[in-house]
């Protein structure tokens, strides 16, 4: 799924947009634990989280995750934005809760990061 | 990297509790590996192992260093800290075991997946710890002839 489609589907806001961001997202990792991202997520996946910490961006960068969606309209602070800009991570915000975001993405055929389960 | 310029090295100081810059050393290592043309999968494994080890110093120890050395054969990373050390290494290596306090968990750390995931991403992994003194990790990721786990 293209980034534009994800934004449209989730009614989200693009907080930071990577310049040459042509994505085809096929799988999603959903967690608030950074070590789970590092253990289970695979390159090129979308991360859905309710954590609004700069560490989320660092973790995405280390794990080759190009797009992070922060749910529940959590306030995204200056530090997190600056880190996303520096690391070329696309950062989206949506007011929808985690359950709904995941349900919508699932219904569009996206897979889980955990061996497709 | 096949030239005879010798190993590429770097060393970083790590401070316990310094969350604002946590991960800088591992991000730098990732950039170096990428610039050297190391395959993405291997770079990613090295970055993940380094990052979990770096975070353990930030979260659990007082101060430490992360040192890396890259040769045509391998990426070597050693992380040494002064800190509480680990009483029971076997227990600490178990998935889900964590002594991280709640405030650390609220920042997204403390899942107890760090040490096992370091071992998983490394080709060779060594951990030594002296309770009351500190912990040392040695990680090797092979650049030639190694497996290519990529977290599968
Ligand atoms: N550098 C360290 N110094 C002291 N204790 C450590 C260190 N690294 C790991 N530990 C201990 O091992 C446990 C498991 O580590 P890890 O698997 O990385 O999980 P986590 O860091 O999420 O707790 C930690 O909770 C801690 O008790
Ligand atoms: Mg850890």
Image (spheres, helix red, strand yellow):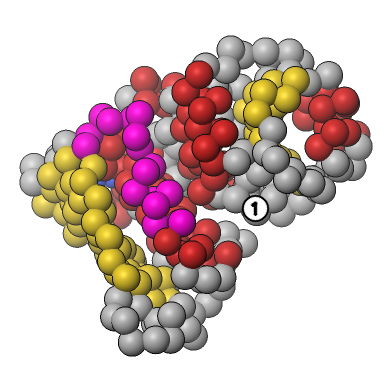
Q: Quadrant of residue A37?
A: top right
User: Looking at this rendering, what residue extends furthest in the right direction?
Assistant: A108
Question: Camera-side residue: B118 or A14?
Answer: A14
Q: Residue B145 vs residue B101: left or right?
A: right
User: Looking at this rendering, what residue extends furthest in the left direction?
Assistant: B133
Q: Residue at x 30, y 76 (%)?
A: B7
Q: Residue B145 vs residue A40: left or right?
A: left
* Quadrant into which the C terminus of chain B falls: bottom right
CA neighbours of label 1 inside 10 A, class few (<14), some (14 to 19), many (20+): many
Question: Camera-side residue: B30 or B146?
Answer: B30
- Residue placed under numbered mark 1 in the picture: A42
Q: Residue at x 47, y 70 (%)?
A: B36
Q: Residue B122 vs residue A65: left or right?
A: left
Q: Is residue A47 visible?
A: no
Dot 1 falls on which chain? A
Seen in the picture, residue B91 relative to B77 is either above or below; the reply is above
* Quadrant into which the N terminus of chain B falls: bottom left
Give x and y (percent) for residue A94.
73, 18
Q: Is residue A79 visible?
A: yes
Q: Look at the image and give the residue range highlighted in magenta.
A: B15-31
Seen in the picture, residue B49 relative to A7 is either above or below; the reply is below
Q: In which quadrant of this rendering is ligand 1 seen?
A: top left
Q: Residue at x 65, y 53 (%)?
A: A43
Give x and y (percent) for residue B94.
39, 50
């Amino acid at each position: 799924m293209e980034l534009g489609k994800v934004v449209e589907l989730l009614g989200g806001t693009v907080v930071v947009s990577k310049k040459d961001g042509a994505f085809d997202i096929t799988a999603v990792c959903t967690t608030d634990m950074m070590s789970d991202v590092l253990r289970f997520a695979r390159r090129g996946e979308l991360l859905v989280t309710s954590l609004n910490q700069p560490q989320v961006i660092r973790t995405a960068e280390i794990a080759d995750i190009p797009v992070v969606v922060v749910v529940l309209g959590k306030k995204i602070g200056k530090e997190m934005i600056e880190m996303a800009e520096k690391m070329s991570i696309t950062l989206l915000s949506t007011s929808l809760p985690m359950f709904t975001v995941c349900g919508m993405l699932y219904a569009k055929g996206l897979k889980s990061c955990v061996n497709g389960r | 990297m096949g030239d005879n310029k010798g190993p590429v090295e770097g060393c970083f100081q790590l401070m316990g509790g310094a969350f604002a810059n946590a991960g800088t050393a591992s991000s730098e290592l990732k950039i170096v590996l990428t610039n050297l043309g190391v395959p993405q999968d291997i770079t990613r494994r090295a970055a993940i192992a380094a990052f979990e080890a770096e975070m353990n110093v930030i979260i659990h120890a007082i101060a430490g260093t992360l040192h890396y050395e890259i040769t045509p054969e391998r990426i070597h990373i050693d992380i040494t800290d002064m800190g509480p050390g680990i009483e029971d290494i076997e227990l600490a290596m178990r998935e889900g075991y964590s002594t991280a306090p709640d405030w650390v968990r609220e920042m997204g750390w403390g899942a107890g997946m760090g040490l096992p995931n370091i071992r998983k991403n490394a080709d060779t992994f060594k951990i030594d710890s002296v309770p009351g003194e500190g912990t040392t990790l040695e990680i090797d990721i092979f650049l030639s002839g190694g497996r290519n786990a990529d977290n599968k």
